């Protein structure tokens, strides 16, 4: 049997960041991760960090490579049928975003964790949580070879993503789920080519949404709106480049540079929130508690703000001995989560023509983008949300 203060399930951004925040506060913790290290470090996902997320990483001393390699973007573009408008977020809000892959954030956090000497257990199988209604919850898991281990702790942090075991551990009658599944998805590619512009371009086009992003000055990350059941075999590289040129209205490929495509995938889109984010001594953070469609670039950043609040709650609990800090966690986190949900839903609705959707709705959404592109007040609001609301 192992004894610790906080058992953290999942070594994604939420779990790893929480581990560092607690370590900094002198709170003992163990991280359990189902997959192996190579798998976790290679999982391609988010790319845009809010300044608040960067500040947390800096504060933790995990930003050396981020400060060197991260691409600071003071602005972003939106486009409607080829007409483009620049949004100067830095001028409007005093803040910028940083393009730095989630893969890199994860690698940096794993390296920092290993330096602390605190346990990070990869390939922990059959993780289960019990006794969450009492003051000493337990976490069981199997290691390779089949030996079972048990951790006794004060708090369990469920940071195991949307498909983890923490959320299903909550008794069903104790929670409410809010959910929306969208009738479209994204086809995402990574290619060895320079990005279409210095900053990201979110483009609405009659044929569908397209996003022009990047990982570095030589690696492009682009997305095309597609069907949720899209077959990747129908998307040879040539068709992808052609469609990207069409949706950016760049027929001669003046901004879009082709290169070897080395990753292709289809990403379904949903909005999901579970309330409350806590039952007894089990606290959820990140994708375990909520999912946003990626159009607002908020998922990873919400994982960061959740664990920032959770670390404060746990630190407050140990310093005061009372439950009030723990009790406040769910409401504090949800208040920010819902604002990011609203923004992600709004960006998604405005930028994607809905196939087979109501024609009136589609015209209104297109008009909304047209309005945003012509109104300082509306653009200011977009900028304020995109760079991230304060914690
Ligand atoms: P993760 O990253 O899913 O990590 C959960 C970890 O838990 C492990 N796990 C278990 N461990 C032990 N026992 C079990 N039973 C377990 N079950 C699972 C998993 O192996 C994994 O290591 O969740 P976390 O930490 O909450 O982080 C959330 C973010 O990963 C996610 O919100 C973002 O990637 C979303 N997202 C974006 N967010 C942004 O902020 N900016 C973006 O630009 C952005 N772009 C994106 C995105 C997500 C995407 N996809 C693929 C969904 C772009 C894409 C394409
Ligand atoms: C990405 O670069 O992967 C990315 C950027 C912005 C988004 C979503 C994904 O909104």
Image (cartoon, rainbow, N blue to C red):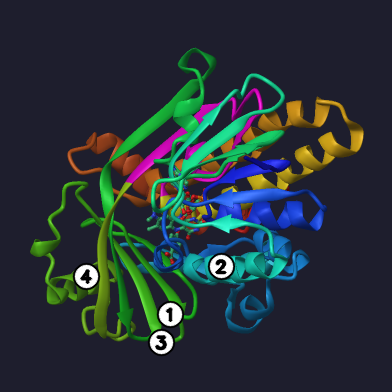
Q: Is 281 one of the magenta-colored residues?
A: yes
Whether ligand 2 has any atom under 8 Å from the Cβ at mark 1 is answered as no
Magenta stretch in the rendered image: 269-293
Q: Which mark is residue 38?
A: none
Which mark lies nearer to you, 2 or 3?
2
Image location (x, y in percent) of residue 197 = 43, 80
For marks 3 and 1 on the same chain, the one whose residue lies earlier in the sequence: 1
- For discs 1 and 2, the disc positioned in front in the rendered view: 2
Q: Is residue 385 above or below residue 255?
A: above
The earlier-in-sequence mark between 1 and 2 is: 2
Residue 195 visible to an observer of this rendering: no
Quadrant that contains the N terminus: top right
In the picture, the disc for residue 246 is: 4
Give the x, y percent position of residue 266: 25, 56
Q: Is residue 158 left or right of residue 229?
A: right
Residue neighbourhood size for the residue with mark 1, other residues' Cα within 10 Å, grouped as few (<14), some (14–19), many (≥20) = some
> In the image, 383: left or right of 206?
right
Tell whether 142 sits left or right of 62.
left
């Amino acid at each position: 049997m192992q004894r610790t203060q906080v058992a953290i399930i999942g070594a994604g951004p939420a779990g790893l960041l929480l581990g560092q925040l607690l370590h900094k506060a002198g709170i003992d913790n163990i991280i359990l991760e189902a997959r192996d290290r190579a798998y976790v470090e290679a999982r391609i996902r988010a790319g845009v960090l809010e300044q608040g997320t960067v500040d947390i990483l800096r504060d933790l001393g995990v930003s050396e490579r981020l400060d060197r390699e991260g691409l600071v973007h003071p602005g972003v573009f939106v486009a409607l049928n080829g007409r483009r408008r620049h949004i100067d977020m830095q001028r409007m809000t005093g803040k910028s975003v940083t393009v730095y892959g989630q893969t890199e954030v994860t690698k940096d956090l794993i390296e920092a964790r290993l330096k602390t000497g605190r346990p990070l257990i990869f390939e922990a199988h059959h993780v289960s949580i019990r006794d969450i209604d009492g003051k000493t919850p337990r976490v069981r898991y199997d290691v390779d070879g089949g030996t079972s281990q048990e951790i006794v702790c004060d708090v369990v942090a469920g940071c195991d993503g949307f498909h983890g075991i923490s959320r299903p551990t909550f008794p069903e009658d104790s929670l409410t789920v809010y959910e929306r599944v969208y009738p479209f998805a994204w086809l995402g590619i990574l290619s060895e080519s320079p990005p279409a512009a210095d900053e990201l371009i979110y483009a609405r086009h009659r044929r569908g949404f397209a996003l022009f992003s990047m990982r570095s000055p030589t690696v492009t990350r682009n997305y095309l709106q597609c069907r949720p059941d899209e077959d990747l075999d129908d998307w040879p590289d040539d068709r992808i480049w052609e469609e990207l040129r069409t949706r950016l209205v760049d027929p001669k490929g003046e901004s879009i540079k082709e290169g070897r495509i080395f990753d292709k995938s289809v990403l379904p889109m949903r909005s999901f929130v579970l309330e409350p984010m806590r039952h007894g001594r089990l606290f959820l953070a990140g994708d375990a508690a909520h999912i946003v469609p990626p159009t607002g670039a908020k998922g990873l950043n919400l994982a960061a703000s959740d664990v920032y609040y959770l670390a404060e709650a746990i630190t407050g609990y140990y310093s005061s001995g009372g439950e009030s800090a723990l009790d406040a966690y769910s409401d504090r986190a949800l208040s920010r989560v819902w604002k990011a949900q609203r923004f992600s839903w709004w960006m998604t609705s405005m930028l994607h023509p809905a196939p087979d959707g109501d024609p009136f709705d589609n015209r209104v959404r297109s008009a909304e983008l047209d309005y945003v592109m012509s109104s300082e007040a509306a653009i200011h609001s977009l900028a304020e949300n995109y760079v991230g609301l304060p914690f």
